[in-house]
Image (cartoon, rainbow, N blue to C red):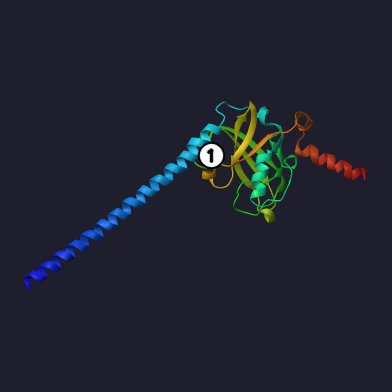
Amino acid sequence: MDSNNDLCETISTELKVCRVMSVHIGVVLAVCSSIMLLSSCNRTWSGSRSTRHLARTVANTEIVGTWQMTAASTNLLIRDGYPLRPPSELTIWVKSDGTLVFASAEAGYPFGPRTYTDATGYWTLLHHSYDGLSQEEPNVLSIELEKPASAGGKHFWPMYLTEVSGQLRLWYPHGDPDSREYIEYERAKEEDGKAREGTSLSDENDEEQSEVNKA
């Protein structure tokens, strides 16, 4: 009888030890999983992104002009459900007075509707500034769109700069960062940028009012 009791106590003790070990193993696996996930994110955002960032300081004058989405980026949008629109119609007109005219897709995929936005706004070129992930970047182009409350109100997001074959490009990650897909803008034709440079939002409004008066 005593031997049976001893056996039962031994089994009970071993089961408790197994349960404790199981809990510890679960904690260890969870920690390891978290470390691997953070490591993966760090590789994507600090590793691959850092090679895309232009290290030199970009001047404001280099940003002024008309930028249009690249064909590859347009194909990404179409793949993800955006209506077909040629790259020449997806533009950001950056003006020397700190304002801009936006006619393109806003950052924020996969959240929100798959539509394009036509709005005015403002831009600021920051240097050695922290982006949304608390990482210091050499150049951050801060975009602010002015939209009515019915359309979501103001929208802010950062864009970054890189160079392809010696030519500047504006870019930001598209969708899941681990996908390493980006929306990019390249400078439109030089004559378009020169024709538009220096025209402010107030000038544009004056021109519209002048046409109304003529009518």
Q: Position of residue 152 (x, y in %)?
A: 65, 53
Q: Quadrant of the N terminus?
A: bottom left
Task: Identify whether 121 is placed above or below 25.
Answer: above
Q: Name the residue carrying label 1.
A: 131
In the figure, is residue 57 to the left or right of 192? Answer: left
Q: Nearer the viewer, residue 102 or 162?
A: 162
Residue depicted at x 35% and y 49%: 31
Q: Nearer the viewer, residue 162 or 18?
A: 18
Q: Position of residue 116 (x, y in %)?
A: 70, 49
Residue depicted at x 17% and y 63%: 13
In the figure, is residue 195 to the left or right of 30? Answer: right
Q: Position of residue 160 (x, y in %)?
A: 59, 36
Q: Amino acid at mark 1?
A: Asp
Asked if residue 155 can be seen in this view, the reply is yes
Q: Position of residue 98 (x, y in %)?
A: 68, 35
In the figure, is residue 147 to the left or right of 142? Answer: right
Task: Identify whether 192 is placed above or below 173.
Answer: above
Q: Secondary structure at mark 1?
A: loop
Crowding near the residue tagged with mark 1, few <14, some 14–19, many ≥20 C-alpha atoms within 10 Å: some
Q: Nearer the viewer, residue 140 or 49?
A: 49
